[in-house]
Image (cartoon, grey):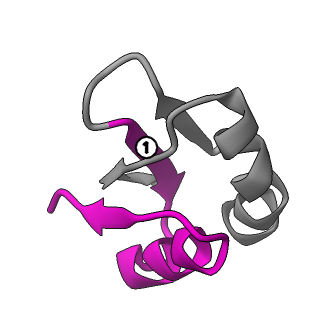
Amino acid sequence: MSHINNQFKTNLNCSSCVGKVTADLNEAVGEGQWTVDTSVNDKILTVKNDIVTAEEVVNIIKKKGFKAESLY
């Protein structure tokens, strides 16, 4: 089964911000199945999955008080 990479523009600016969404993302898509590049302006969240929709990922981030928008 192949995994689909979904990318999102976020406002997860630092490791503390990422830490606030870690448990929820790990539960939804699995530990090690997502990363956030806080070194780029758009703070890109990349999610590797074939089960969770882009909308579900956006909702997880928003519930924690952050912004996320799908790049696809």
Residue 30: image quadrant is bottom right
Quadrant position of the C terminus in the picture: bottom left
The percent coordinates of residue 4 (x first, y second) are 37, 55
Q: Which residues are magenta?
A: 43-72
In this rendering, would 40 be left or right of 32? Answer: left
The percent coordinates of residue 48 (x first, y second) are 50, 50
- Verify whether residue 55 appears in magenta: yes
**Residue drawn where x is 60% and y is 75% of the image:** 60
The percent coordinates of residue 24 (x first, y second) are 77, 66
- Verify whether residue 45 appears in magenta: yes
Between residue 29 and residue 24, name the one nearer to us: 24
Q: Do we see residue 30 in this rendering? A: no
Q: Which residue is mark 1?
A: 46
Mark 1 Cα within 10 Å, few/some/many (few <14, many 20+)?
Answer: some
Between residue 28 and residue 14, name the one nearer to us: 14
Find the residue positioned furthest to the top. Answer: 39
Residue type indicated by callout 1: Thr
